[in-house]
Amino acid sequence: SKEKTVSVAIFARCLFLLWSVLQDEYFEVPFTDIDYFVVSDASRYAQLGFASRQYLSAELRMRSHYNHVSLYQKIRYMALGDSPFGRTTYRYSPFVASFMLVSYNPLIGKILFIVVDVVVGWLVQCTLDSLRCPAKVRLVSTAVWMLNPYTITMSTRGSFESITSLLLLGVLRSVLEDQVMIAAILYGIVTHL
């Protein structure tokens, strides 16, 4: 059933997330994608740009300022010209760094990607429902996304591919519902990831 598939998918992602913590801590080769660290670092750099202009030391910024800045202020700092491109290792769109604005803890970004990954599976189900596909096709298609080891691994390693998938499915749903403007906006965003 659909509920069982979602439950197993969430459980599998939680197990992979726990494994990622163990492997990152105790093994030579980390589970977490190196790009996750690059994006997190660039996002943190952009968020704290205002503090750096006030000549705070890096340690002071990390400990005292970062955890007390509201999400609104973090977005404002980026809007004021504090760019993730200030980090020499950053090579993605600023949109990607903005997804990590809530990342106070290394696991929060991964949890965000996991939640989005499950939402993508739900959106697959909803899209197939709206197309009136047979129940077996809906169940199998949803299970292929939700229980796919590749998608589970990608989100639990900290890859933002689930956000790309969510936006692309949003484009598809918008086109199917004849909401061209929303489809165009989502497509514009996804092309910048």
Image (tube, grey):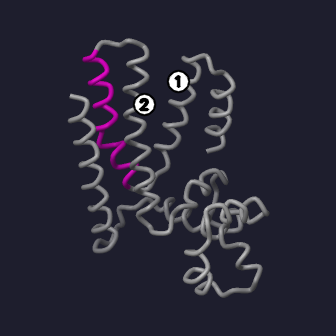
Q: Could you say where residue 86 lies in the image, as x and y percent from the top left? A: 71, 68
Residue under label 1, please give it: 173
Which residue is painted at 47% across and 59% down in the image?
A: 109
Q: Could you say where residue 112 lies in the image, as x and y percent from the top left? A: 45, 53
Q: Quadrant of residue 14?
A: bottom left
Label 2 residue SS: helix
| Magenta stretch holds residue 76 | no
Task: Using a 10 Å C-alpha cutoff, classify the residue at mark 1 as few (fewer than 14 neighbours), some (14 to 19) or many (20 or more).
Answer: some
Q: Which residues are magenta?
A: 135-156
* Number of marks drawn: 2
Instruction: Specify the quadrant that holds the N terminus.
Output: top left
Helix, strand or loop for the magenta stretch, by majority: helix
Label 1 residue SS: helix
Q: Could you say where residue 31 lies in the image, as x and y percent from the top left? A: 35, 61
In the image, residue 20 above or below residue 162: below
Which residue is painted at 57% across and 54% down in the image?
A: 99
Which residue is painted at 44% across and 44% down in the image?
A: 116
Answer left or right for 160 relative to 28.
right
The three-letter code of the residue at mark 2 reads Leu
Residue under label 2, please give it: 123
Question: Quick one: 74 or 28, which is closer to the camera?
Answer: 74
| Magenta stretch holds residue 153 | yes
Task: Using a 10 Å C-alpha cutoff, classify the residue at mark 2 as few (fewer than 14 neighbours), some (14 to 19) or many (20 or more).
Answer: some
In the image, residue 64 above or below residue 68: below
Q: Quadrant of residue 73?
A: bottom right
Question: Quick one: 98 or 27, which is closer to the camera?
Answer: 98
In the image, residue 49 above or below residue 2: below
**Are dots 1 and 2 in contact, CB under 8 Å?**
yes
The three-letter code of the residue at mark 1 reads Arg
Of label 1 and label 2, which has the lower sequence position?
Answer: 2
Instruction: Specify the quadrant that holds the C terminus.
Output: top right
